[in-house]
Amino acid sequence: MRPLGRGPQLSFPSLWDQEVRHTGPLILYSAFTGALAGLLLAFLNALLRALTEALGLFFGYLAPEPPGEGGLAQAFTGPSFWPLAFLLPLLFALTSFLGTGQGLAAFLLQAREDRPTPPSSHLRAVLGGILQLSLYSPMGREGPFGVLGLWLGRGLDRRFPRLGGGLAFAGLAAGLGASLHAPVAGALLATEILYRSLLLEARALTPALIGALAGFAVYGAFYGYTPLLAFQAQVDMGALPAGALVGLVAAALATLWVEGSRFLEGRIRPLPYPWRHALLGLALALALLVLPEALGSGLGWVAVATTPLLPPLAVLSLLFAKLLLLLLASGIRAYGGPYTPALVLGGLLGAFLAHLPGPLALPPETLALAGGVAVLAGVARAPFAATVLAAEWGGYATLPLVLPAVLLAYVLTPAYNPAEGVREEQATPEGSPSETPPQREPPPPDPEGAGGRETPPG
């Protein structure tokens, strides 16, 4: 759309009619994309759960599920023959050939700029992520979920080019919203992760919201609509100092993870790619024999940590073990997303802080929620999504504690792997990314325009 006051003038009625013509189909197709993505994600989650259960029974450990999907049941017997644990390095080396090593932001950037990708790259990323997650990887399922939704949306964008793009964001938001049981936060996260600052894809937010809501409506029919971690607690404005302290500690933890991963990635880069993943498999095998609670995503253990079942020392030990595994997993670029691990690290941190006296003597559920979304805001560079996630999981009564924690963690945490996102200085007043269509403008309705070559926004 050409801004008013530059070049040929557009009258308000014609401008309004053009927007209505393009907005109506975009809304319908976004809802269709989200619903179809939700159905596919339900099947993908069923596959993940089946593989996780089968491999967990083989290796002797099933991690507890988050309360929003299956409760807190767990099983641990240990491997029937302890050397079986050392099959994990071999399995991780084999699965390394499936994935691509690209994160969600890289796939999203390719979709936004309409750059071609290898035909099998999305499928490989989904399969590699699912297999490694079923083998106790500490990464998050939002990785393969988001890639599947993005893959579907991008395919529909190409099938219906007159919509002008945006369905890729609808599919991605459906994947993120379903993985977190938080559709609005998933939509915001889908439009925030591409940038290192408070820039949003304004034209992408509408299809993202519609796609996330439609996707979760279908996905929730299979796995329920309750939050993954339902932390209902109320605080007042007196919790602001505690929120600031949580934000400072969360920023330190997020920075340790981000910078530690970057340092480790540089040190192990000379190793062949399968050997790097085998190294993570070896670490997981040792954890299976020594501290199996550190295996898997860990959301179930965050719920347990907010109860008296885990003493403070046990929570601290689990936090330290998860951090070590995540440092290694991020350093080798293991398959999966970093957002669930951020919530787990921050949640365990908040649960530990709840045992300390002083201004942090608040309900452990509230501190776990504030710590989780604070680390998420710092790692994902997504303060809006983190704040809304806290409201979707714990209610708006937690905002006096959550807001200062999120804002401080976001400001004080360095951006992780900025090469995958769009640098803020690339945005110009004439072509700000917040006003640029996700992929391309709709072609003109005349026959000549329909046959011309479409170019991504520059």
Image (spheres, rainbow, N blue to C red):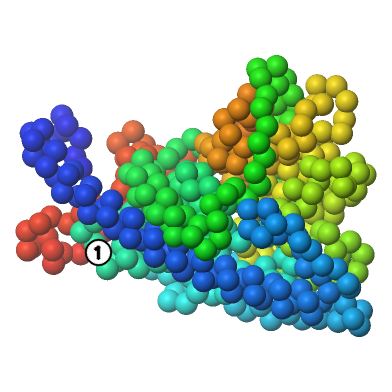
Toward the top, the furthest residue is 238
Taking the spot 36% from the left edge, 61% from the top edge, the residue there is 33
Which x, y percent locates residue 105?
A: 51, 55
In the displayed structure image, the side of residue 97 where residue 34 appears, left or right: left
Which x, y percent locates residue 118?
A: 44, 74
The quarter of the picture where residue 234 lies is: top right
Taking the spot 83% from the left edge, 39% from the top edge, the residue there is 352
Label 1 neighbour load within 10 Å: few <14, some 14-19, many 20+ = some
User: Would you say residue 214 is visible in this rendering?
Assistant: yes
In the displayed structure image, the side of residue 432 where residue 143 appears, left or right: right
Taking the spot 68% from the left edge, 53% from the top edge, the residue there is 67
Q: Which residue is mark 1?
A: 160
The quarter of the picture where residue 243 lies is: top right
Q: Is residue 450 above or below residue 428?
A: below
Which x, y percent locates residue 45?
A: 57, 67
Taking the spot 40% from the left edge, 54% from the top edge, the residue there is 214
The residue lying toward the viewer, choosing from 426 and 105, is 105
Q: Is residue 161 above or below residue 47?
A: above
Q: Quadrant of the N terminus?
A: top left
The residue lying toward the viewer, choosing from 431 and 334, is 334
Amino acid type, label 1: Phe
The residue lying toward the viewer, choosing from 20 and 396, is 396
The residue lying toward the viewer, choosing from 163 and 60, is 60
